[in-house]
Image: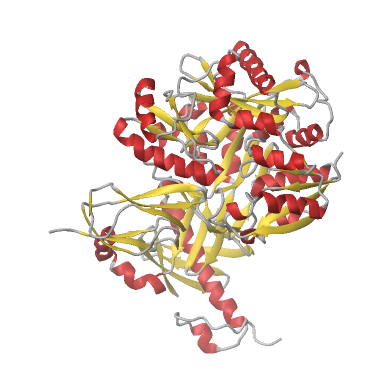
Amino acid sequence: MEYEFIIDDRLHKISFDKKENVFVISDGEKTIEANIHFISSNALSILIEGQSHLVYLAREGDKKYLSLQGQAFTVQEPSAEGKSFVDKEERSQQDELLVRAPMPGKVIKINVSEKEEVRKNQTLAIVEAMKMENEIKSTIEGYVKKIFVSAGDLVGSENPIIELGTRD
Amino acid sequence: MFKKILIANRGEIAVRVIKACQEMGISTVAVYSEADRESLHVQLADEAFCIGPPPAVDSYLHMESIIQTAHQSGAEAIHPGYGFLAENAEFARFCEKENIVFVGPNSKALRLVGDKVRSRQTMEKAGVPIIPGMKTIPKELSEFNSEAGKIGYPVMIKASAGGGGKGMRIVHSPKDLKSALEAGMREAKSAFGDESVYLEKFIEEPRHVEFQVLADNHGHVVHLFERECSIQRRHQKIVEETPSQALNPKLRTLMGETAIKVMQVSGYNNAGTVEFLLDKDRNFYFLEVNARLQVEHPVTELTTGVDLVRQQIMIASGEKLPFQQEQMSQRGHSIECRIYAEDPLNNFLPSSGKVLFLKEPKGPGVRHDCGVYSGSNVPIYYDPILAKLIVWAEDRTAACQKMVTALDDYVILGIKTTIDFLKEVIAHPQFAAGKTTTSFIEKNFDGWQGKTKTEESLRLALVASAFDNFSQAYSSVNKGAVRKEVYSPWQALGRWRIGGEK
């Protein structure tokens, strides 16, 4: 079986097959054999060449959360996000113009109005979550094209708040 | 002694108080908001009552609902924990009026120490050293301008009702003053329901050293030594320890005596903490009284052997302190790390969501005060503290090693936490050297990118992910579930089992 995963914005391919009692795994360069067991619903024991590794794993939607060797990984399946992953370069340009909520929270204040000119680092809006206010700043110099939310609204992570435009 | 206590809080501190009550044979009443129906404190208490919708102002800050619940359940006392109503003099007074014991200071002392401006005046009169700054709250915003000029930039904005870093802002130049004041006032208003702020001289690179005090209702006051809480982000503590590396026995005695004096001057009773700033030249200044149980109280408990929550309840029920100052001593070293639902890689932005998996660290000398469990939700409405990890060892070096090991043994999946960040903080050479000041994080961890992932760990992550998909596809066939989007030969085969029917 071939699997694809995205970790830290990089796509990784791995082939994974069962051969009798071991798993044969290849990343294209290196092939290894491993003995793997779920030892509880969130813990995996992996034996590779006599080395024992413990991996904690939980899943939610198309994401897996892993902890191993004191390091945390968020693993994304590309199936749902595949298209946007390919278009990532393009999206990042758009992203600069689309100001999104950094985390789920409540819009406390919109500091600008539509058509207003904005400087780089100017505070555009304030979103509060868990009793902390977070100022959302402009990453560019330009103007406010559209405001999607108003004070008091609850926003989810990555929800667009403001669209900026550049005067070329 | 009380038979039943209502705990007007949530999260790890509600759990801590419930456990103390259980050990003392006292029944517990939990209150919860609609967002907290499944929270740990609701599960652990003997009784639990919903007191309103998720926003704190409609639930955990809603005094009438809480008092009414106390009457309804027959609770004789209310323990407020920390935050929410813990330092609200109006609430303490409300309890007094309704004949419910408030497990905390009397409302008069609370009003005095809770008003940072008034308590500064009182302390100055009593000869306690204070930080230069405003001694009244101005009526007009414009007055701040001239005051700031008099004090001299940089100045610190502080909430008069404040604590926990809420409403605090450092201002370096006059042009930033207005917006910082507005933000500070808004934050103070939402955190404490009082928007009064004032200005103080900003002391550069200070240490934050505080003294734990217990005062009974009969005039006996003792201190239980210091805690150093210099490691902060956003003016909020994340690592605390005792004893402090900055104090020698002479300074410790002097500061302890000053702390007792502060409490006596304030007419204070129950547990409280006197906060000081210690500057580079070891001058100390009175900062404020935290009129409540502190988040970091466990480090004092582990080094003095005194259960502070138990003492709070005993004092509230009218008992005398069972010890004198001369009997108090500290043994070994204790460190606490606060585990917050925050992303250290992204400016410590809060990270709400579901705790998919939690593995608690264990071992000798390891204590974990925790408010979440595998499967619990972390709502956006409240403080992002999830848990506290506290260790005790014979000396500081051993305590640091124990903390790093315990953090390594600690897993929370599903939301971002400060665990990995704290590991790096404790392991930092400057921390090991005891060079802890309030600008430690800024100085040593600005633009922190996290630990670089090794090739090996990346490969293991991929192997584990592939195995997970592989076995899920297998088990979903067994359960007859259909996996969408991925074509799988296992599905095409329909129901089957290895080895065939036996």
Classify the position of the C terminus of chain A by image quarter: bottom left
User: Would residue A91 be visible to someone looking at this image?
Assistant: yes
Q: Quadrant of residue B214?
A: top right
Front residue of B23/B479: it is: B23
- Return the x and y of residue B319 as percentages of the image width and height: 84, 30
Front residue of B347/B273: it is: B273
- Return the x and y of residue B483 as percentages of the image width and height: 51, 81
Q: Quadrant of residue B73?
A: bottom right
Q: Quick check: B208 above or below B41?
A: above
Is residue B296 left or right of B443 when viewed as pictured?
A: right
- Return the x and y of residue B340 as percentages of the image width and height: 54, 46
Which residue of the protein is positioned furthest toward the front in this rendering?
Answer: B139
Is residue A28 left or right of B220 when viewed as pictured?
A: left
Front residue of B21/B471: it is: B21
Q: Residue at x 74, y 21 (%)?
A: B221
Q: Quick check: B88 above or below B32?
A: above
Q: Quick check: B428 above or below B245?
A: below
- Return the x and y of residue B121 as percentages of the image width and height: 55, 21
Q: Residue at x 36, y 41 (%)?
A: B447
User: Would residue B287 be visible to someone looking at this image?
Assistant: no
Tally of numbered tags: 0
Q: How is the image coloured?
A: secondary structure
Which residue of the protein is positioned furthest toward the left in this rendering?
Answer: A168
Q: Quadrant of residue A110?
A: bottom left
Classify the position of the N terminus of chain A by image quarter: bottom left
Is residue B14 left or right of B482 when viewed as pictured?
A: right
